[in-house]
Image (cartoon, rainbow, N blue to C red):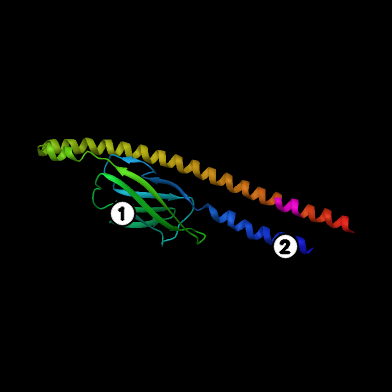
Amino acid sequence: MKKLIILMFCVFMIVPSFVSAHTSLSSSNPTEGQIVTENLEQITLDFATTIEELSTMELVKDGNKVTLGEIKVENKQLIGRISDPLDNGSYTIHWKIIGEDGHPINGEINFSIQTDQSQSETNPATPKENQDTQDQNSQSDQTEQNSVKQNNASDTVEQTDNNSSSTILVIIAVILVVIFGISLLLFTGKKKR
């Protein structure tokens, strides 16, 4: 009987660590390794579970911190607004969250900016041409943003499905181990009598 109690205690100590390990980054904009060619206005990190208000991020370029306008938590998202257009170069997002289970988790995302900044400086245009160009850019930006949102939504759904499947598999594995352990204890207990 003592063996059964010890086994059950061990199983109940292991199960919470499997279950609580599911707070993870499910998608981001920009993504890891992405080369951004448009003006980036905000950074959005989506997580598998709800995150706490103490969660934060910082943007770094060449070892120097880039000031973000506002950082806020919205349910499963960590959003950082970019106040000034980013210069071309390599950037790293360092994020640190507190998961719903209270465990701190951190990570980083590397991306780069490559926008055509020389065109506006070397080719002055009339106000009418500027307005026409801005209208065209605005329409193409909206189309591209809608496409990115749809891709991110499908990625999030796919990763959520993967997390649900892995959770179910872990629970089934734990249940099978418990049943096997109980059967083994009962079987060996009967032999000793």
Chief SS of the magenta region? helix
Q: CA distance from mark 1 to mark 2?
A: 51 Å
Note whether 154 is above or below 98 in the view shown.
above
The answer to which quarter of the image holds residue 64 is bottom left
Instruction: Please tell me which residue is depicted at 43% across the width and 57% down the height of the picture.
Output: 97
Instruction: Say which of 38 and 129 sits in front.
Output: 38
Residue ID for mark 1: 63
Mark 1 or 2: the one toward you = 1
Q: Secondary structure at mark 1?
A: loop
Which residues are the magenta region?
177-181
Give the labeled residue for mark 2: 6
**Residue furthest front as drawn:** 63
Q: Is residue 68 visible?
A: no
Location of the N terminus by quadrant is bottom right
- Compare marks 1 and 2 and give the one earlier in the sequence: 2
Amino acid, disc 2:
Ile
Residue 189 position, x and y percent, is 84, 57
Amino acid residing under circle 1: Gly
In the image, is 185 to the left or to the right of 68?
A: right
Label 1 CA crowd tier, 10 Å (few <14, some 14–19, many 20+): few
Look at the image and tell me whether residue 177 can be seen. yes
Report the residue at 31% width, 43% height from top.
112
Between 36 and 126, the one nearer to me in the picture: 36
Q: Is residue 180 magenta?
A: yes
Residue 130 at what x, y percent from top left? Answer: 14, 38
Q: Position of residue 88 (x, y in %)?
A: 25, 44
Compared across the picture, whether 35 is left or right of 16 comes to left
59 in the magenta segment: no
